[in-house]
Image (cartoon, rainbow, N blue to C red):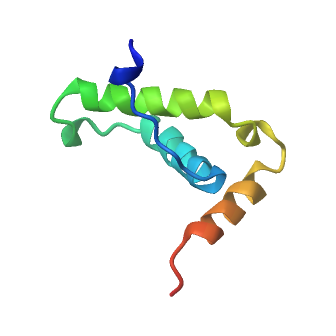
Amino acid sequence: MTDQQKINLKVTKDEALVLFEFLARFNQSKHQDIFEDQSEQKILWILEGQLEKKLVEPFRPDYKDIIREARNKIRDEE
């Protein structure tokens, strides 16, 4: 794949953690009815795998605290 075919997305560490947590949970469930094509499901698996390679926090014993803090930072004020 050439560099012209790649798109880089920039997210904060907190955003990456929240997205990873969502994708991991989502990809473990059956959601066949929402996909128009299997490629949509596959890209979610790919994104989860790419995040998993970059993040060390999901493997830490205090991950629940880390993800809670990340969600709190991102969440809109009510």
Residue 30, relative to residue 42: is it above or below? Answer: below
Q: Nearer the viewer, residue 12 or 3?
A: 3
Given the current orientation, which residue lies at the most extreme front position?
A: 4
Residue 70 in percent (x, y) is at 66, 61
The residue depicted at 58 percent of the width and 47 percent of the height is 16
| Residue 15 left/right relative to 35 | right
The residue depicted at 15 percent of the width and 35 percent of the height is 36
Given the current orientation, which residue lies at the most extreme bottom position?
A: 78
Q: Nearer the viewer, residue 47 or 38?
A: 47
Q: Nearer the viewer, residue 32 or 41?
A: 41
Residue 49 in percent (x, y) is at 54, 27
The residue depicted at 84 percent of the width and 44 percent of the height is 61
Residue 65 in percent (x, y) is at 77, 59
The residue depicted at 41 percent of the width and 39 percent of the height is 29
Q: Nearer the viewer, residue 25 or 43?
A: 43
| Residue 50 left/right relative to 2 | right
Residue 28 in percent (x, y) is at 47, 35
